[in-house]
Amino acid sequence: MYMVKKKNIVSKLWLKFTDRPKYKQYKWDLVNYSHFKFTEFLTGNDKLNNINKIKAVADATHKLNLTHSGNAGDIIYALPTIKKMQEITGADINLYFRLGRPMDLPLYNSHPLGNVMLNEKMAGMLSPLILAQPYINKCELYTNEKIDIDLDYFRSGLVPMNKGNIARWCSYITGVSPDLWKQWLFVDPDKTFSDTIIIARSGRYQNKYIDYSFLNKYSKVKFIGIENEYKEIKQFIPSIEWIEMKDFLQMARVIAGCKFFIGNQSFPYSIAEALKVPRILEVAYDVINVVPEGENGYDFFFQEHFEWLVNHLNEGQ
């Protein structure tokens, strides 16, 4: 069996200063052992980590209880895997939210929920949208229900979370491959926004070389997001209007009905991606883990490409 014995602090320092090559090998082996133990954990007999195991439980109980602790965007990106799981099994899917999981952020970053990934208010705003999906049977707060699949296992350390595609994280731990090029959120579009460009831009994941000021020449531009984000973008687009949302079902209906959507790697973009509306993604250089897939999806690094894409979609593609 593959095994690495962890050294105490004295042994580790002695090795570090007396035999540098062997110390590096020890560190390498330790990391690989950690990955090995995590993989062993995920593939244990009691984990529903492949389609056959998942289907066996679904056939026996006719339901699957899943849990997720957020962030809100991560939950939206988990849905295509959940949708495919329901299609494969035909089971009732019950999704339970775990509240209050701590979130680690760099000191220079902030988040609307502070230092947790999901609180009761956010869960309340998210639930109506989740419950509106035809493949979801139940969406509630977790209160000690028996859970079949804990979707938070993607956070256990092996799945790289700063690159790739967030929408694949849950597929890696379940073996269920989602159809990411297909729509996975379904709402009635709010057609009062059919001639409106909708923008969302969080303080995190901004491309600092991008200037939104050119959007002043477009007549109908509105913003969705929190108030401090609105105040920031209003410095560049003084005429932009803010649409306050009672919940995320309303947000999804606005995005579904808009002319096209512009956003960075934040929660509202996850909704646009799930709806497959015409959408433009502002990509941050330091963390690239959101990927437009399927029709109507565009992304950019550079200003001139951004301006061309906006003009292209505004003229009707």
Image (tube, rainbow, N blue to C red):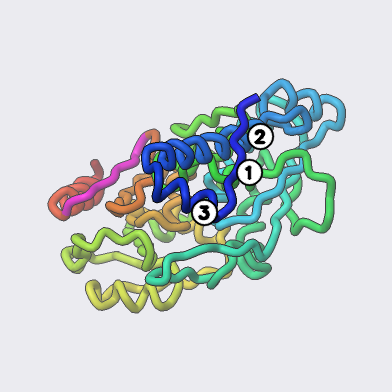
Image location of residue 53, percent across then percent down: 74, 25
Along the viewing direction, whichever of 153 and 293 lies nearer the viewer: 153
* Vertical comparison of 2 with 145: above or below: above
Mark 1 surroundings: few (<14), some (14-19) or many (≥20) residues within 10 A:
some
Q: Amino acid at mark 1?
A: Tyr
Residue identified by numbered label 2 = 42
Q: Secondary structure at mark 1?
A: helix
Question: Is 201 positioned to the left or the right of 8 in the image?
Answer: left
Q: Residue furthest left?
A: 304
Q: Given contact means CB atoms under 8 Å apart, are the residues at marks 2 and 1 in contact?
A: yes
* Vertical comparison of 2 with 226: above or below: above
- Is 299 in the magenta? yes
Residue identified by numbered label 1 = 153
Which numbered dot is residue 73? 3
Q: Amino acid at mark 3?
A: Gly
Q: Is residue 198 visible?
A: no
Q: Secondary structure at mark 2?
A: helix
| Label whose residue precedes the other's in the sequence (2 or 3) | 2
Along the viewing direction, whichever of 129 and 45 lies nearer the viewer: 45
- The residue depicted at 40 percent of the width and 77 percent of the height is 228
* Vertical comparison of 20 with 295: above or below: below
Image location of residue 125, percent across then percent down: 61, 64
- Is 79 in the magenta? no
- The residue depicted at 21 percent of the width and 47 percent of the height is 309
* Vertical comparison of 64 with 228: above or below: above
Q: Which residues are magenta?
A: 295-302
Question: Is 83 positioned to the left or the right of 107 in the image?
Answer: right
Question: Is 123 positioned to the left or the right of 182 in the image?
Answer: right
| Label whose residue precedes the other's in the sequence (3 or 1) | 3
Q: CA distance from mark 2 to mark 3?
A: 23 Å
| Label whose residue precedes the other's in the sequence (2 or 1) | 2
